[in-house]
Amino acid sequence: MKILGALLLIAATTTLGARSASRLYRRERKLRQMYKFIDSLCEEIRLTRAELPDALERTGGSKMLSDGVWTDTYGLNVGDIRVLDSFLSALGKTDIEGQINNARLHKSALLERINEATEEKKKFSKLYLSLGFLCGMFAVVLII
């Protein structure tokens, strides 16, 4: 019975570590999705000179945006959301060249956030997994 309890405790703490690590992966993936969306929107506007609603429709903006708000920001931190909201607040308020410049500015800011998320993922994902397992082992040693 003690062995089963010990295994369950180790599994639980390892799962917590894995969930913390998956948050880092999720953040990087979502930032990359946002970057691709802004890039495709910028190119659509630049190449076709399309109006904003048409460009949003062609680039899949309905999946990313709902009533001028990002639909899925789970896993992003406050700084990431500020960059994305800044992009949306300036979108559609200038001429085509201004919109392209706005997209380029926010793409570079997002690229910095992506690089930061990648470094954070490399640095901390293994740490979270190891910490989860080791905390479980430590608790088992204390209990037994």
Image (cartoon, rainbow, N blue to C red):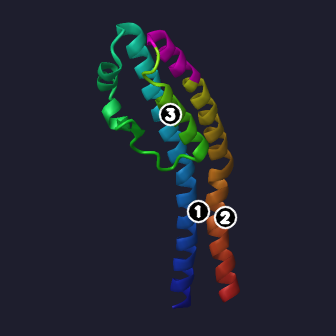
**Residue 85 among those drawn in magenta:** no
SS state under label 1: helix
Which of the pair 43/23 is nearer the observer? Answer: 43
Which residue type carries mark 3? Arg
Task: Tell me the chief SS of the magenta region.
Answer: helix
Q: Residue at 45% across / 21% down in the picture?
A: 93
The residue at 61%/28% (across/down) is 109
* Pointer 2 with pointer 1, Cβ within 8 A: yes
Q: Position of residue 132 (x, y in %)?
A: 62, 66
| Numbered range of the magenta stretch | 95-105
Quadrant (top left/top right/bottom left/bottom right) for the C terminus: bottom right
- Of the residues shown, which amino acid type is indicated by label 1? Gly
Q: Residue furthest front?
A: 93
Query: Which amino acid, by three-letter code, is at mark 2?
Result: Leu
Q: Residues within 10 Å of mark 3 (few under 14, many from 20)?
A: some
For disc 1, the marked residue is 17
- Look at mark 3 in the image and give the residue it sits on: 32
Q: Secondary structure at mark 2?
A: helix
Q: Is residue 127 left or right of residue 94?
A: right
